[in-house]
Amino acid sequence: MASPYPDGDREKVASKLPSVLQQQLKVRAAELSLDIQEAVEAAITAWRATERPGFEVDTAGAKSFSTWLPPGLYEHFKTTCTARDVSYIQGLAQSIRDWLDDNPSPKDAVAPSEPRRIISANQKGGVGKTAVALGVGEAYAEDREVSRKALTGFLEDISYSDLKRIGKTRGDLQDQLAALTFGGNRVLVVDYDPQSHLSDQLGIPQIPPGHDSLVTHMVGDAESDLRNLIVTVDDPRFGGRLHVLPGAFDGFVLDSKLALTAAQSRGFQKEASLERALRPIEADYDIILIDCPPSLGLAMDAALYYGRRRRNEKPQRSGVLIPVQAEDSSATAYNMLVDQIEDLRKDLSIDIDYLGLVVNQYDARRGYVATSSLDQWNNINDQQVLAVLDDLKEQREAVRVKKPLLSYAPSSKQANTMRMIAMGAAR
Ligand SMILES: Nc1ncnc2c1ncn2[C@@H]1O[C@H](COP(=O)(O)OP(=O)(O)OP(=O)(O)O)[C@@H](O)[C@H]1O
Ligand SMILES: [Mg+2]
């Protein structure tokens, strides 16, 4: 529907647009110092000109939306919609979606060649470091529209008790979803644990002793390019974007190798060894996740150093993601990790950001110990609980059949919670 603009330059157009897109459009236009009508004009013009096939946008529940466009543009747009056999509402939604993707927030435009680095760490064993590193990596690699759609539905249905556990409202999470763009990223998950559980869970063989691996690259003994070791997860859901650097048996002696190399070669900085090894391949990725072993040695220092805030990097873009459990022994382990982080910060004068906690395998039926521990996690300074994961069968089943969780059970609560963690960590 179109009606004349007061000064005759533009005509009013009334349609419908999902509220998430309306909100994102408003924020992005403001960030780019554009009027909304200019942004919509650019979006529609680009959409009409593109030869990219449109990706269907979920327009159920779209809300009234009106703007002002140059005379005639909306009529041309309607002709294009008819030719593409999509409704006007779908055409508008696709135009805005594509425009948002093609015009990223200036906040995300810093250092585009440097990937975000997320370190999944806790020296306590079996708390979910591997499950979280892999699940979150899958969420980032998954197609943007697929995860957005899944999260939109998940947030609509999320229960009051699930929200209460993390002290957030549905609106808080919907705002987060509206304000960010993730998904469709090029992701590398580094199996930094010599136990190589992550590799094993995907059916990827561990690198045997004495072979080139991340370890040889870290201590300067490598013979071949690190890229030759990387495995692409062969699953259409991730479109070839999810890669794994397999675990190596030699990782069991990484700490002593690092100490020896440092003793033998003057100027060898142990803490920078992981960074030196991964730098050459960083430009290939948007996000690199490190699945750490349950230990606190030199190798762990190198991982934490790798997750530090780099010069010109905005706070909370990279950092440490800490899976914990709602029990007392987990609190002791957490305190030891934090001590190590704080020591590194002081000794090396660096910033290491806390991206958040994931309380894993939560079972309220365990009573007071579980519920009071969860309260404590929610009340730690400098930390936020990004999500609470229940003890769910899909996680174990995915491991059993050696498939990525988001591919094995894409609509499960476990998969959606991984997407929610990815969303919360991507600030
Ligand atoms: N939310 C969950 N629900 C059910 N099973 C889970 C969940 N999270 C993890 N698991 C299972 O618990 C086990 C331990 O999890 P995981 O390997 O992720 O922990 P970890 O901290 O990486 O352990 P490690 O310290 O040995 O590296 C795995 O078998 C995993 O499949
Ligand atoms: Mg692990």
Image (cartoon, rainbow, N blue to C red):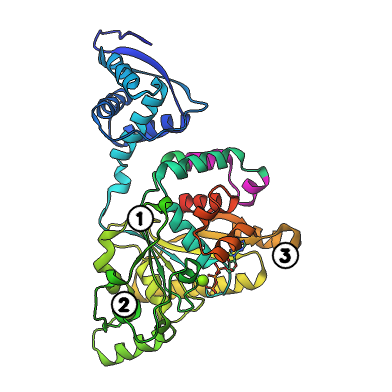
Report the amino acid beneath label 1.
Gly
Residue under label 3, please give it: 369
Would you call the spot at circle 2 few (<14 residues within 10 Å), some (14-19), or many (20 or more)?
Answer: many
* Stretch in magenta: 161-176
Mark before the other along the chain sequence, 2 or 3: 2
Question: In the image, what residue occupies the spot 27% across and 32% down?
Answer: 33
Q: Is residue 382 visible?
A: no
Q: How many marks?
A: 3
Left or right relative to 402: residue 231: left
Which one is in front in this view, the residue at disc 1 or the one at disc 2? 1
Would you call the spot at circle 1 few (<14 residues within 10 Å), some (14-19), or many (20 or more)?
Answer: some
Which numbered tag is attached to residue 273?
A: 2
Would you call the spot at circle 3 few (<14 residues within 10 Å), some (14-19), or many (20 or more)?
Answer: few
Question: In the image, what residue occupies the spot 40% across and 56% down?
Answer: 316
Mark before the other along the chain sequence, 1 or 2: 1
Report the amino acid beneath label 2.
Ser
Mark before the other along the chain sequence, 3 or 1: 1
Q: Position of residue 119 (x, y in %)?
A: 43, 66
